[in-house]
Image (tube, rainbow, N blue to C red):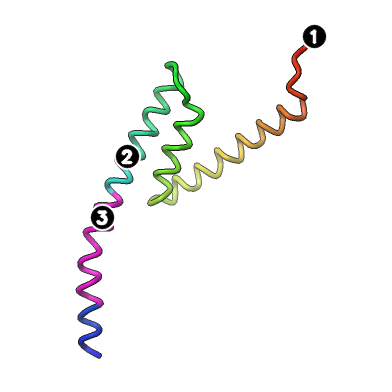
Amino acid sequence: MAESDNNRKFTGALLRPYRIARRIVVGVVGFTVLLLGLIMTVTPGPAIVVIPLGLSILAIEFAWARVWLHKLRRKLGDQADRLRKRGGNNKG
């Protein structure tokens, strides 16, 4: 029984640096993509695609990014519904 506990501690000790490294990598990549998306709001580029992509990457490790992503999806869905109700026909 004590040997099993030691194996769990050893395995946990090995996984901890991996989890920290993964969190750092996901954070750096996610923030970079998100920042590029924010830059694209004032420069030519597909910001409406890149910003949710950055939040999706960050949502892998961070709960706050999941919340923002859900809010963004809800708002984009509401906008799409409004456009559908309008008919999307702008003829005079």
Q: Is residue 28 magenta?
A: no
Per the model, the C-alpha gap separating discs 3 and 2 is 14 Å
Q: Residue furthest bottom?
A: 1
Say which element carries label 2. Answer: helix
Front: mark 1 or 3:
1
Task: Please give the count of numbered marks on the rendered protein.
Answer: 3
Circle 1 sits on which residue? 92
The amino acid type, in three-letter code, at marker 2 is: Val
The label on residue 78 is none
Circle 3 sits on which residue? 20
The amino acid type, in three-letter code, at marker 3 is: Ile
The answer to which image quadrant residue 57 occupies is top left
Circle 2 sits on which residue? 29
Q: Which residues are magenta?
A: 8-23
Q: Residues within 10 Å of mark 1 (few under 14, many from 20)?
A: few
The answer to which image quadrant residue 55 occupies is top left
